[in-house]
Amino acid sequence: MTPRFKPGGRRGISYIFSVMLMTLVISSLAAGVLLWGMGVVNQSQGAYAVIFEKKIERVKERLVIEDVRFELSASPQKIHIYVRNVGAIPLTVDHVYIDHTMVSLGEPLKLGIKEGNYIDLNSPIPLEEGETYLITVATTRGKTLTGYWTA
């Protein structure tokens, strides 16, 4: 009877070598996938950082309407709105809404920290004495302040 395997054969060594070779191939492929995934995550984080920064700036904006005056006898009727920046960053007011009707300011009003100024605009709707109007002031970052004022 002849033995099935020769005592000095290389069958065991080639098996170990093939397992090591496959482990090396799989490890290198896994490293490539890992590096690709880390790049995708870094790109996503960069995009989200810009979005979060804008949202944080919007939260830092604080605006107060201190006074509203109506000129009903003038033609066209006028509205004077005194706004003050009480937030932590400078802001720019670019739109005002009177009863949901948008009035675009010719030149946006820029306010530094703790600064205030009047917004003078022609009324987009007919005003009546004793009536209450919804006034909304909007900044370029999207922050809005709304209040009801009586003419």
Image (cartoon, helix red, strand yellow):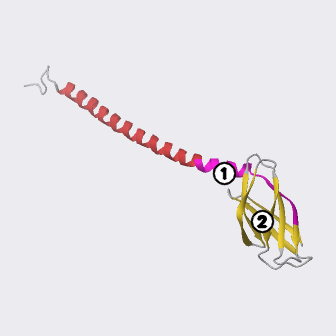
Label annotation for residue 136: 2
Q: x and y percent of residue 139 in the render?
A: 71, 58
Q: x and y percent of residue 3 in the render?
A: 11, 25
Q: Residue at x 66, y 51 (%)?
A: 55
Whether label 1 touches label 2, CB < 8 Å: no
- Within 10 Å of the Cα at label 2, are there few (<14), some (14-19), or many (20+) other Cα atoms? some
Along the viewing direction, whichever of 112 and 52 lies nearer the viewer: 112
Q: Is residue 76 visible?
A: yes
The range drawn in magenta is 50-68
Q: CA–CA distance between discs 1 and 2?
A: 20 Å
Which residue carries the number 1 mark? 55
Residue 84, located in which quarter of the rendered image?
bottom right
Label annotation for residue 69: none
Q: Which amino acid does label 2 sit on?
A: Thr
Find the residue positioned furthest to the top.
Answer: 8
Along the viewing direction, whichever of 133 and 8 lies nearer the viewer: 133
Along the viewing direction, whichever of 69 and 139 lies nearer the viewer: 69
Q: In this view, does 121 lie above or below 73?
A: above
Q: Nearer the viewer, mark 1 or mark 2?
A: 2
Relative side of 119 to 12, left or right: right
Q: Which residue is drawn at 44% across and 43% down?
A: 37
Relative side of 151 to 4, left or right: right
